[in-house]
Each structure stands twice: as C-alpha cells, then as structure tokens.
Amino acid sequence: MADGGNRRVWSGGCACGGVRYEIMARPSPVSFCHCGQCRRQHSHVGAYTTFPREALRLVADGTLAWYASSERARRGFCSRCGTGLFWDPLAEPRMDATAGSLDEPTGLQADRHIWVDFKGDYYSLCDDGLLRRTSTEPGNQTLFNDPTED
C-alpha cells in the first residue's frame, strides 16, 4: 500500500480484525527469537520486525490489550482472538511487530536468530545461513531502521 503515492505502508492485524495497524517506515529484517518468553507467547519461536515507535499507527484497537512481560517491556495482543502483535521495549524509540501479523506481501526477509542460548530443548537449529546471537552478544535483537528510509 502506498502513502501519498510514494511511500510504502506496511499493514497488519490480528486474526479476528479487532486490531489493525500500519507501519509508516520500512520495518527491519525479521529476527527469530528463541527466548523463553517468546516461546511461551507464540507456542514456539517468536518472529519479529522492528520499526521506529512513531511509525506505528493503530487503525483499529478495540481489542488491543497489553501485558507487562517485564519491568522493561510489554506485549500487545488481541483480547478476543489471542493473536500476539507487539513487543514494546518501553524506554526505547523502537518497537516490534510479530512478522506473522503483517499483511502479505511484506517484502521482508529473515536475517538472524537471537537469544539462541535460551532455545527450547525440543528442537534443533538447522544451518539456515542466518546470523546467530546469544543473549549477551551485541546484535542480539532486531535491527533498528533509519526512520527516513522507506
């Protein structure tokens, strides 16, 4: 979708349509997060894309609910259908949307696995050619895009 004819807008939402959103800046490549919170939230690995906080526009938020998952972050989800939508690090100028909640085509590619030292014991990480970062390494989160890029 275009915004004013030239800039791409990424849209997404939950399964029931109670939450719809738009991202007005190019989201980052997708990161697969293997931390325990993501695995519980998504019933397996979390897949996220990052964007500047000010680039988010909520189009419909009647069923959007937030869960304080830690002192530093909260998770947004639909209170009706349960779709996980956002990871919001409160003190940072960025936030994440779940890659699966974006409307296709996204034009995004995955570029890394993060928090691999916390991956579940029930699966193996195959060699898919993507970067791998532990919880203590630099680059263990999704990349933050320059909000001036589209």
Image (spheres, grey):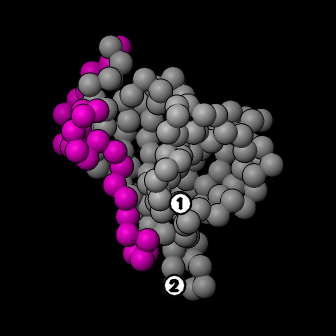
Res 128 visible: no
Q: Name the residue under label 2.
A: 6
Magenta extent? 122-150
The amino acid on which the numbered mark 1 sits, given as a three-letter code, is Arg
Left or right of 144, for residue 126: left
Mark 2 closeness class: few <14, some 14–19, many ≥20 residues within 10 Å: few
Mark 1 closeness class: few <14, some 14–19, many ≥20 residues within 10 Å: some
Point 42% across, 23% down: residue: 36
Point 60% across, 34% down: residue: 68
User: Residue 53 — which label?
Assistant: 1
Q: Where is residue 29 in the image (x, y as percent from the top left)?
A: 36, 55
91 up-or-down from 7: above or below: above
Place residue 60 in its image quadrant: bottom right
Point 26% across, 25% down: residue: 117
**Along the polypeptide, which appears first: circle 1 or circle 2?**
2
Element marked by disc 1: helix
Q: Quadrant of the N terminus?
A: bottom right
The amino acid on which the numbered mark 2 sits, given as a three-letter code, is Asn
Q: Give the residue at the far bottom of this rendering.
A: 5
Out of 86 and 123, give the one closest to the viewer.
86
Q: Where is residue 45 in the image (x, y as percent from the top left)?
A: 42, 30
Marks counted in the figure total 2
Q: Position of residue 146 (x, y in %)?
A: 37, 69
Res 119 visible: yes
Q: Is residue 147 magenta?
A: yes
1 up-or-down from 58: above or below: below
